[in-house]
Image (cartoon, helix red, strand yellow):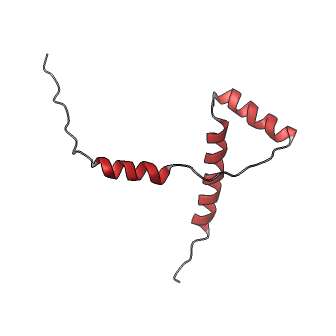
Amino acid sequence: MARRKKKKFPKVDPEYLEHQRAALKRVYRKSVLFNAQELAAINEYCRRFGISSRSALIRKAVMLHVLGGLDKSHPTLF
């Protein structure tokens, strides 16, 4: 049986990778308060869909909403 050749990827500069990691590091904290019904809904959603990180879920939902709103209201030339 013939072996597959391994694909060779170009090497990435480690300094560049470190810079990218530093740029994506989360250092700013925001707090959100939920009422009992909202928290129950979040917990149920996480239980139902097997989500272990509620903070990641909330972060993704917020950013999808924010970026979607920015996308819809971008300035136009004409």
Name of the residue lying farthest toward the right: 36
Q: Quadrant of the N terminus?
A: top left
Name of the residue lying farthest toward the left: 2
Q: How many marks?
A: 0
Q: Is residue 13 above or below residue 1?
A: below
Name of the residue lying farthest toward the bottom: 78
1 horizontally vs 58: left or right: left
76 horizontally vs 3: left or right: right
Q: Is residue 61 above or below residue 54?
A: below
Residue 9, picture quadrant: top left
**Residue drawn at x 63%, y 30% as measured from the top left:** 52
x and y percentages locating residue 34 in the rendered image: 81, 44
**Residue drawn at x 61%, y 46% as measured from the top left:** 60
x and y percentages locating residue 68 in the rendered image: 60, 59
x and y percentages locating residue 35 in the rendered image: 86, 43
**Residue drawn at x 20%, y 36% as measured from the top left:** 7
x and y percentages locating residue 64 in the rendered image: 61, 53
39 horizontally vs 53: left or right: right
**Residue drawn at x 56%, y 76% as measured from the top left:** 75
